[in-house]
Amino acid sequence: MARTDETHLDDLRDEYRDSEAPRPRKRKERELASELKPGEFLRYCWRQLTSMRTALFLLMLLAVAAVPGSTFPQENNDPAGVAQWELDHPTAYPWVERLQGFHVYSSVWFSAIYLLLFISLIGCVLPRVSVHWRSLRSTPPRTPSRLDRLPEHRSATLTSTPEEVLDAARTVLARRRFRVARREGSVAAEKGHHRESGNLLFHVSLVGLLLAIASSSLFSYSGQRLVTVGGTMVGTTFDSFTGGTWTTADDVPPFTLTLNSMDVSFEAQQTSQIGEPRRFAADVTLTDEPGEDSREETIRVNHPAKVGHTQISLSGNGYAPVIVVRDGQGNVVQDGPTAFLPQTANYDSTGVVKVPDAVDADGEAVQLGIRGVFLPTATTGADGTPVSAFPDVANPLLVANVWTGDLGLGDGQAQNVYTLDTTDMTQVLGDDGQPVALAMTPGQTVQLPDGLGSVEFVGVERFASFDVRYTPGQSAALVFSLLATSGLVLSLFLPRRRVWVKAAARGTGTGVEVGGLARGNDAGLAEEVEGVLRRLREALGEPEEPADQPDGSPPHPPVGDHEQPVHAPEERP
């Protein structure tokens, strides 16, 4: 039996090969006959590009293409990181640079994906808008001849006349927010067109959101500057600056800001919240442009000052000990407040003083580096080291070490002013051979060994960190995000339904049929059809009857047979 089956299968294969033998020539002839002309080929490419499948693929590809931007440091916002990456990966760096890995968001390949996504979404949405507009202005479809074949069907016999039933049905359906069309012997109604409106709103808002993000990426900028009390900053000078693809520091308004005072307070009464910040405010004098009148502003957290569309926000604060350094000849080589950056909630702060032009007692040139810790309210920690017990200034103490050697300021490399590279430096030692540790309170001066000079801790000033930011697409992105969410809600929860009511004389009464059709699965369609028939009875003053039957067991024959059923392909029951 098995052998017979194998023989029969071989015979079928032979017949299949014989029947397929002439097909290659026919296929080749068919391909040659259907070669696309240039115009037809372009239309084919346009259809493929503007399909929803392509748009979704490009959206996913855009998300994947953005991954290298978070993997590699970017030149526009972290040039120091790029330089460090080059030192750490000398072999891979040229290849990453050729592939624009350090300029991902302005690269040719990322921009190409972004533009193709724009074109795909716009080409996909615009034709649907015109189709939907015509659908909104069209009348409900004609009544099918057999309502009992619809997914939901109810029938009843009423004592009112057919005209009265149809007039009442028109009123009931209109109150249910259906679009109604009166036919001969029936009423056709439809609602839920705004489901597609929500779908289109979502896609149009997605295009707008992408445009807003693109404008922010191209034209936004963000700059940071630390200013001590009494100091001034201008809009073209920053400690750090991050600009968009088409933006530089020259695009920042040329404002001038002077920090007059800092109003800072901390919780000192409640034990459970002691040290918690209560108020941060910077009183500044702001001039929008050179030659204009200045104005007084108070910049608080979440309450920035504005120069045109540019926001100036308060992003941080801290202490700047006033340190005076004299060299071995008694010359003042450093005098002024130096910002120390907070490291803990109690403002244990670290900072660096660099003195490149000092001389020792013998007249030899020497470079000094002072690395210290400032404690606004000094106390002794559990391990015996000094720490701050409270963020406000109550018992200030400056603890520092001193280094001599090459500060590295002459090699042209940019340096972080808040760190000290001691690779080519030697720590200053005392007479006992131990590193010199300076511990000073305000007004105290300490002499350095080996005729290096002295360090004086004069007092404490405050500083504020300001963030200067311009994001042109921020408000638009919020609006389009809300619109996209609204459109998505409409497209998901607004049902698309069609309801027909037929009425014809039957004996001494009127036979009534109500049929319903939904686009896709709709659990509420049965309730909708039953509700229409129930409200129709109420409008006509008809009593409830058990004669109303669900679909599948109609007690009455179909009402009328004067029209043919019409169904859209996606709505066929």
Image (cartoon, rainbow, N blue to C red):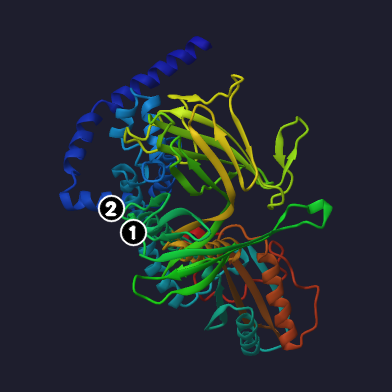
Residue 572 visible: no
Element marked by disc 2:
helix
Residue 525 horizontal/vertical position (percent): 65, 65
- The kind of residue tagged 2 is Trp
State the image quarter where residue 429 is shown: top right
274 sits to left or right of 228: right
Measuring 71% from the left and 85% from the top, which residue is drawn there?
509
Q: Quadrant of the C terminus?
A: bottom right
Name the disc covering residue 332, or none: none
Element marked by disc 1:
helix
Q: Would you name the residue on which mark 1 appears?
A: 123
Residue 506 horizontal/vertical position (percent): 67, 82
- The kind of residue tagged 1 is Gly
324 sits to left or right of 149: left
Q: Residue 282 versus residue 339: which sits nearer the camera?
A: 339
In the rendered view, would you say 422 is above or below 213?
above
| Direction right: furthest residue | 271
In the rendered view, would you say 396 is above or below 308?
above
Q: Residue 572 versus residue 19: which sits nearer the camera?
A: 572
Report if the CB atoms under discs 1 and 2 are less than 8 Å apart. yes
State the image quarter where residue 524 is shown: bottom right
In the rendered view, would you say 348 is above or below 158?
above
Residue 223 horizontal/vertical position (percent): 43, 54
Q: First in sequence: mark 1 or mark 2?
A: 2
Measuring 40% from the left and 71% from the top, which residue is drawn there?
288
Q: Would you name the residue on which mark 2 appears?
A: 46
Measuring 53% from the left and 28% from the top, which residue is drawn there?
449
